[in-house]
Image (cartoon, grey):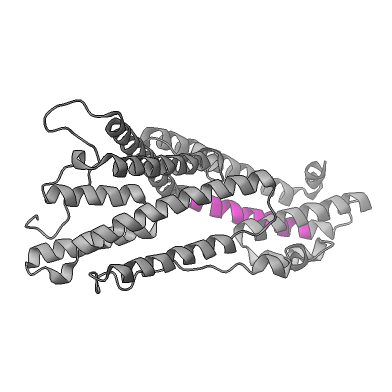
Amino acid sequence: MPSSNKPVPSLTPQIASPSNRKLSKLQQEFNQKTEQIEQLKQELTTRRESINLAQKRIEKELRPIIEQQLEKRVELAYLLDEAYALALFSFREKEKLAALIENITFDLISSYERQDMVELHDKYAEFTYAERTAFPAEDLDEVILEEPEIEDAFEDLDDFERIQAQLDREMEQRERERLHRQKSRKTKAQLAKEAQAKAELSNISKASRRVYTELAKQLHPDKERDEAKRAWKEEAMKRVTQAYHHDDFFELLRLQVEFMQEQGQALDTLPDEQLQYYVKILTDQVEELKAELHDFLTGPNAGFYTRFCGTPKQMDQKFKSAREDLNRELEQLKQNIRTLQSDPQMIRVLLK
């Protein structure tokens, strides 16, 4: 055990032959899967970090310009409201003017939470803002369930059956949560795909439970008299529990490798039956990570990532371009307001 109270650095689980003999096909496949998972995790981490950084930069660099634009759009809405009362416009033009005010105010309320625009919106809209945004009660009954906790991770770890029963209950709870999140009716193809994913998740959960139980027994801190080793075990156990909660078999395996190395054990001693089982579970986790990465590339965050994220140099260029566009729009908005204030008849240009 290390003398410090920090766990050893994380390692990619890899099988190496101490005698330099050629690895078996199964051992090579194990190494390929773990390396692939490490790469996928790194790419996902990089994308998440880039998105988080972009969100911070938006608040710092773009939000002040956007706020100025919002104030000018509010000013424009009130300017159009005043013009509506003038005798300059025909009945048809006033219909268009009312629709324009309604659209501007609705966007200010729904997109930017400008509740001060509700009264002006309702003045010109056929339906009030509250009526337009009313939702059926059944759409609001989603319950957010908290992640279960392992309260007795360090207690009575010699009682193997007690640990197994506790982990079984947690697996059942997770399954109930997944079922709860299923709302709409699915097609046969969707149901078949979900059944396959469920089976893969079940395999990962079972493997995670097995490794977690082994590590929980080995890392029992209450039985350790050496204070430095005890502190290390407590910290390691926190990481083990967190990985188990997220069904992250790869991370649990990584932690197991760290512990095995601390004990002078080697991965090449794993029996083929266990190794084959690990390869199957790692394959399932590869597919999960690929699906998660695919969501980044095609899901709701795809457009945001393309517009604002990337390498530091790419992000600098994208934010420079965004600032220039926003400032250009702001100046145009200011100019439009000045023009309409000096000559209300120019509002007809907006109505075409």
Q: Relative to the observer, which residue lies in front, 291 or 315?
A: 291
Asked if 309 appears above or below 253 in the picture, the reply is above
Q: Is residue 157 left or right of residue 343?
A: left
Residue 87: where, in percent of width, then height? 89, 56
- The part of the chain drawn in magenta is 63-81
Q: Looking at the magenta stretch, what is its main secondary structure?
A: helix
Q: Position of residue 2 (x, y in %)?
A: 9, 55
- Residue 126 lies in what quarter of the image? bottom right
Image quadrant assignment for residue 81? bottom right
**Residue at point 41%, 49% (across, down):** 52
In the rendered image, residue 72 lying in the magenta stretch gets the answer yes
Q: Residue at x 51, y 37 (%)?
A: 306
- The quadrant of the image that shows the C terminus is top right
Q: Is residue 115 visible?
A: yes
Between residues 339 and 104, which one lies in front from this camera angle? 104
Q: Nearer the viewer, residue 214 or 245?
A: 214
Judge from the rendering whether residue 26 lies leftward or rightward of residue 10; answer left or right.
right
Q: Quadrant of residue 150?
A: bottom left
